[in-house]
Each structure stands twice: as structure tokens, then as C-alpha cells.
Amino acid sequence: MTFVQLIDCKTSRFDEMNRLLDSWVEQTKGKRTATHALVGKDRSDDSHLIEIVEFPSYEEAMRNSNLPETDRIFREMVALCDEMPTFTDLDVVRDEQLNRVTAREFFEDAGRADLDRLFERITDDYVDHDPANPQDTGLRAARDEVAGWRRAFDFSFRVDDQIAQEDRVCTRWTWQGRHKGDFLGIPATGQDVTMTGMTWHRFRDGQICEAWWQYDRAGLMEQLGVLGQ
């Protein structure tokens, strides 16, 4: 279970505290078990800081605490604080990165949902970057492209991996389909085919506003008997 520690402190020596945290990051390379660290400053009190540190589990957090570098940095941090910091230990019981959830739902619905429902997740000024197209396209072209894939294949996506950072989500996926209609001039073969790829989605206000696609179209064409003959 993911574990998070909140360190609540007050200090008038923020720049020194920042340098101290940089020092800990540098000195614990290859040793630390922390996966994410975030420092917030109270808007109503510049001296009030909260650091949030994430670990894969409580046990990994304890391993991290036992590092000599962590112990030394902790003592130096206390010396920089105006008063003794407080610590809150939390087991994470719910963790939703909402943009990642939306990206996953887009792929889960791509082969089956009503197009209006599918594109509720997409902004009106959406921009699509697809190496199969000679130039970037917009929302209407994206809808037409999905409709074309649906006419040619019964298909679904399997989400294999996802990472999220700031306003972007990267999804590594596997596409599986049955060729049921014309595709780029290739008449229906009834062939079961697969394709792998990755998509970066950029979000604005909870909706997808831009996408970059990379996928093995050549491998798909080979399975349909067009290449490699």
C-alpha cells in the first residue's frame, strides 16, 4: 500500500531549507526509496511549509528513514525550523489522477461507445498529431477517423501502462481487432489482428485538447497481407 508522510514545519530560512532538500536528493541517489516529494508554502504565511513525501509502502519509508543521509538531513532541517516540525503518517486509501482516469476511459470506450459520448472528453479546438496523416488535424477529422476505424474493424484497446505528469498522460496500449470492412483499399479479410502503440494526451480543464500518436501500422498492414509478401 502506498504510504505518504506529511512534514509540517515553520522556517524563516526557506532558501537554506531548499538547498538542504537538494542536498538530500543528491546524496541519496541509488539508495532512497521515496518516489515523489512535494513542498507547499502556505499562501497566508510564508514561513509555513508542508512537505509531502510518497513511498511505495510503509516498509520502504522505514528503509528510507534508516539511511544515514536521511538522519543527518533531518537533524539539519530541525535546526533550520522555528519550532519542532510535526509528522503525519498516512496509508493512501484512494489515489485518483483524474486526467489519467479520463485517458483510460477514452481507450476503453474507443471501440464501443457512442461517438458523442466518446468525444465529450475532447475540446472543440483539439489538435491531433498522427504520423499517418500529412498534417495535424482537428476535432471533426478525429471523429471521422474513429468512425472509419469502426467501419473497418471490430476493435478494442487494452491499456498496458500509464504515466501522468502535470497536464499530460502517456498511455502504452495494445489494440486488437477483426477486419470486417474496407481499410485503405483492403477489402474485409475476417483476419484477427493486433497492434501496439503509445499516445500522449495533453489536458485542459479536465478535457483532452491535444494528442500525439505512435503505433505499428506497418505491422498491422503485414498481418492484413499487404506487406512482407
Image: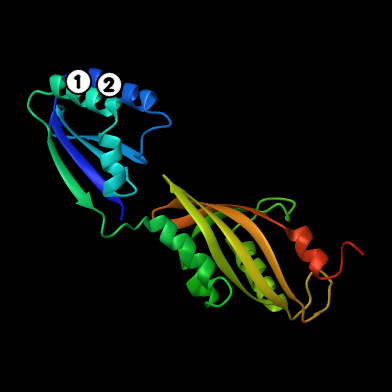
The residue located at (73%, 56%) in the rendering is 132
Can you tell which quarter of the image residue 143 is in? bottom right
Question: Farthest residue in the left direction?
Answer: 83
For label 2, the SS is helix
Residue 13 image position (x, y, % from top left): 18, 19
Taking 76 as reference, is 88 above or below it? below
The type of residue carrying mark 2 is Leu
Q: Quadrant of the C terminus?
A: bottom right
Badge 1 marks a residue whose secondary structure is: helix
Q: What residue did someone put label 1 on? A: 76
- Report the Cα–Cα distance between label 2 and label 1: 8 Å
Looking at the rendering, in which quadrant would you find the N terminus? bottom left
- Which residue occupies 71% across, 52% down? 131
Q: Which residue is drawn at 64% across and 55% down?
A: 137
Q: Quadrant of residue 25?
A: top left
Residue 72 rendering spot, x and y as whole percentages: 23, 22
Residue nearest the viewer, comparing 4 with 202:
4
Task: Give, as a three-letter code, the residue at label 1.
Answer: Glu
- Can residue 153 be seen here? yes
Query: Compared to 66, does 157 lie above or below?
Result: below
Which of disc 1 and disc 2 is earlier in sequence?
Answer: 2
Q: How crowded is mark 1: few (under 14 residues within 10 Å), some or many (20 or more)?
A: few
Q: Which residue is drawn at 44% across and 62% down?
A: 102
Question: Is residue 4 shown above or below 12?
Answer: below
* 10 and 5: which is toward the camera: 5
Q: Residue at label 2? A: 20
Placement of 34 over or under 226, stated as above or below = above
Q: Are marks 2 and 1 in contact (CB under 8 Å)?
A: yes
Q: Where is residue 115 in the image (x, y as percent from the top left)?
A: 55, 74
Q: Residue 228, position in %: x, y?
A: 89, 61
Rate crowding at label 2 as few (under 14), some (14 to 19) or many (20 or more) other CA atoms within 10 Å: some
